[in-house]
Image (tube, helix red, strand yellow):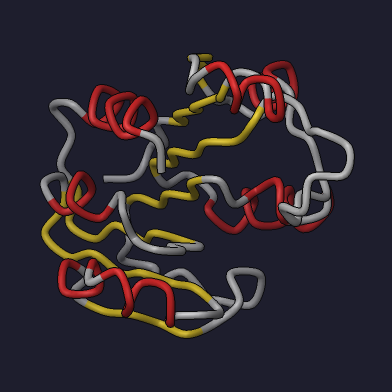
Amino acid sequence: MEPQTLRQVEKALKGKHFRILVDLGIGFGEVAPVLKKHCDYLIGVDKDLERVLLSGYNILYDQLVKEDVRTYIIPFEADAVSLFDLIEHLNLNEGLDLLKKIGSRFCILTTPSKFYQGALNGHISLWSVEDLDSLGFKIVQFSVGFFRELLYGWKIIGVREGGRL
């Protein structure tokens, strides 16, 4: 994950603390140090845990779950969910279903604002600022560097506050 994205995540989480945060699609887990500062218990979910085990960030998760995020049942007690660079890897209906499963929990996500045709990145859906705004997210767009912008445009971070206690 780019340093610019980590700074934006830290900024978005400033002053927030959660009992249980579920990080969906953890990949290498490089955002775990930021997330861990904002929760009592951090659950990481990914269908492939090899990357996080190789990176060493696995030690920051209180629990790791090897499961596809589309079938994972978010614990009722979880009051926050993160999905960084994940939603674009799901088709539109799967992404909407996942956001519906997250429900009224606090939710933070990142996604690119465009795709480069031919990039081997597994992106299959594009989420616009307008799409996320219509789903209740507050949006910030930011630069992640010239070359990444050529491929993926500015990055979008979205936060939906949620109403759970």
Q: In the image, residue 126 lies at what x, y percent?
A: 79, 35
Residue at 52%, 80% in the rendered image: 48
Count of marks placed on residues: 0
Quadrant where the C terminus sits is: top left
Residue at 62%, 49% in the rendered image: 99
- Residue 163 falls left or right of residue 36: right
Identify the residue at the far right of this view.
117
Q: Quadrant of residue 1?
A: top left
- Residue 34 falls left or right of residue 83: left
Q: In the image, residue 66 lies at what x, y percent?
A: 47, 85
Q: In the image, residue 31 lies at what x, y percent?
A: 30, 49
Residue at 29%, 57% in the rendered image: 21
Q: In the image, residue 70 lies at what x, y percent?
A: 66, 70
From the viewer's side, name the closer residue of 72 and 126. 126
Q: Compared to 48, does 9 lie above or below?
A: above
Q: Quadrant of residue 94?
A: bottom right
- Residue 107 falls left or right of residue 10: right
Q: Compared to 134, does 27 lie above or below?
A: below
From the viewer's side, name the closer residue of 40 and 103. 40
- Residue 21 falls left or right of residue 84: left
From the viewer's side, name the closer residue of 70 and 76. 70
Residue at 71%, 52% in the rendered image: 121
